[in-house]
Amino acid sequence: MKNHTPLLEVKNLDVRFAVRGGDLTALRGISFSLDKGERLGLVGESGAGKSVAAFSILNLIARPGYIAGGQILLEGKDLAAMSERELRKIRGNRIAMIFQDPMMTLNPVLSIGTQMVEAIKAHRRISTKAARDIALDRLRKVQIPSPEKRLDQYPHELSGGMRQRVIIAIALLLDPEIIVADEPTTALDVTIQAEIMALLLELCEQENVALMLITHDLGVVSQVTQRMLVMYSGRIIEQGPTREIINDAQHPYTQGLINALPQMGEPGARLFQIPGSMPSLKNVPTGCPFHPRCDFATDQCRQTMPEYVRSGNVDVACYEVSNLIEQEKRMQEAGS
Amino acid sequence: MTSPLVEIRGLEKRFDLSGGLLEQITFKGGRFQRKQEAVHAINGVDLQVRKGEALCVVGESGCGKSTVARTVMGLLSPSAGEVHYDGQRIDNLKGRDVLPYRRKMQMIFQNPYASLNPRMTIQQTLEEPIRFHQPDIARSEVQAKVQEVMASVGIDPDWGSRFGHEFSGGQRQRIAIARALAVDPEFIVADEPISALDVSIQAQVLNLLMEAQETRNLTYLFITHDLAVVEHFGTRVAVMYLGRVCELADTKTLFAEPRHPYTQALLSAIPKLEDDRPNYIRLQGEVPTPVNLPSGCVFHGRCPYANERCRKEIPKLIATDGGAQVACHAVEEGRL
């Protein structure tokens, strides 16, 4: 499918943090794309680099972090090479972001209405009255009860779930093409989480907005997204259609993550556990970063990072998987 | 049936909000008024923890589950009601009389970054409870005990001279568990022990807790908001809402056939791997504030089955045919 350009294409992105004693590589050769209206999940444990990946899409990496290489193409234009001025026209306008903690994102001393109007007026030349009407419309879209009243309320007067609805309303203000949501429901209770995720999904479908959902919750990913990326130690180790990965994960790490979920085991039985923990960026193992925790690790894994191979519609970076695929091929050839 | 190890009777806990006498007095409409307000965190909870079981208390934030844990441990004193341990009332004990129970009952906290003293080595952290509870024990014996608990939680005994910050979150939680096990307790209260950890680490810690339960014959009171963990780990489950227990049942029974409308909604909100879309029971409104409790059933404002009786009369926990105890008029009357 070379003939269509995706809405967003990230190519070989490297992000590093300059700290005392040398650079730490937080993202290493990340490549993926996002089509119009597509919902993409980004999964990994803490330290995998998923939030850095989300921030870098808006080129929001602050010093000491910097983009060391690669491109972030929004309809062919490279965000990594843009000036701050040009980036401002895109942030919040064409690409909106939703963060984990709604109390941190809302300004506590400004009313909801003021904050919403401010965001619109930063990008469009319209009257305050017209901006307020847009704000009101978006609050209705996120199903907040009595939206007129909310415009004059302050963030502390709302509950956690309501605040996250306001944040979604703000993200929708300027009809963005992409929403990047970084753990939008982690701070919320399960019943509220279910409501917010359902709402986000409905709105993205209705407005044909592309969603990039960063989360550690595989259940949420399988409910909301069409494709997913699995990250480990700054790399994408597996990517493809969500259903295919959840039902039949290829990479040993993804398999381990899924099998470690309590809902996968027999009640009372020991859970599957991946030994050890994610390496720190200061000493990333050579070769495949997962090899110290992997049952299938060979000398090859310890020395060189595997390239992506395709299994079904899934791209996986694992020697074990590529060996299996080749074996299968040989068997088929021998058979025919 | 054997007598319960821990029994909570009619437990209530209020946290005063109104401050001192002078702060309570306001001048309104030409006269002075005294106004007292309190957060009603627990409102009449009866629970029995049987020997050898893991009783899980679940609910959303603000439902009082952590307050129950702390009151049982004696970290908070109840406003009303009693806590019994092995037939002996313990909530009114003072000074030296409490000590034997402190040894038998230990607690594991949610955040291993906060529960370990940053200025103590692991060796010191683990020695302290042993020395405190058994002051006459020989130094070599303390040493041996520390080595034994460290090995049993999978921490290398040679790391004793390290400090808490040198360990990862999962390792810290293992150390916190080792500290609880160091005095050979019978009963452990674990307040969200795995919520702060990553999925693959959660599995490791859950396995460790189950192992300790088998080898040391422990009884758990396990507080969590994660229902998937409960299904895996719990013997029985108590679901709490706004300071009351609304359903109490065997884990299998509860997950197979939840009876209380709140339990049903809560279970439906867990994001499941096999779902392609969010699929849950929508509740109306939000959890009311525990300052002004609703009359009658605390859940009536959000319950689709509420009627006049629910608004007036507080439902009691009543045993149903399925073996569950449910506090719901609709279930009792056969409407649900």
Image (spheres, coloured by chain):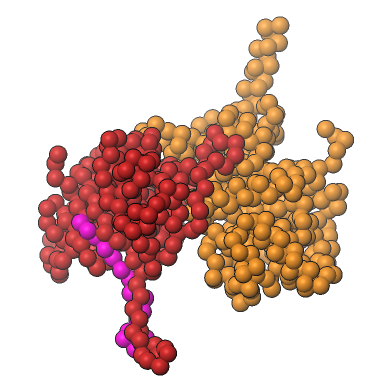
Chain colours: A orange, B red
Position of B99 with respect to B58 (left or right) is left
Q: Report x, y in % for residue B98.
A: 16, 63
Q: Report x, y in % for residue A31.
A: 74, 43
The quadrant of the image that shows the N terminus of chain B is: top left
Q: Which residues are magenta?
A: B9-23
Q: Report x, y in % for residue A236.
A: 66, 42
Indicate yes or no whether the magenta region holds residue A20: no
Quarter occupied by residue B105: bottom left
**Residue furthest bottom as drawn:** B30
Position of A149 with respect to B15 (left or right) is right
Indicate yes or no whether the magenta region holds residue B10: yes
The quadrant of the image that shows the C terminus of chain B is: top left
Residue at 50% x, 32% y: name it. A295
Residue at 36% x, 45% y: name it. B330
Q: A262 or B171, which is in the foreground? A: A262
- Relative to B46, does residue B22 appear above or below in the rendering? below
Quarter occupied by residue B42: bottom left
Q: B275 or B292, which is in the foreground? A: B292
In the rendered picture of this protein, how many numbered marks are placed on residues?
0
Position of A258 with respect to A118 (left or right) is left
Q: Report x, y in % for residue B136.
A: 13, 61
Q: Is residue B270 visible?
A: no
Q: Is residue A220 visible?
A: yes
Q: B233 or B106, which is in the foreground? A: B233
Residue at 22% x, 58% y: name it. B10
- Relative to A330, does residue B130 appear above or below in the rendering? below
Position of A34 with respect to B214 (left or right) is right
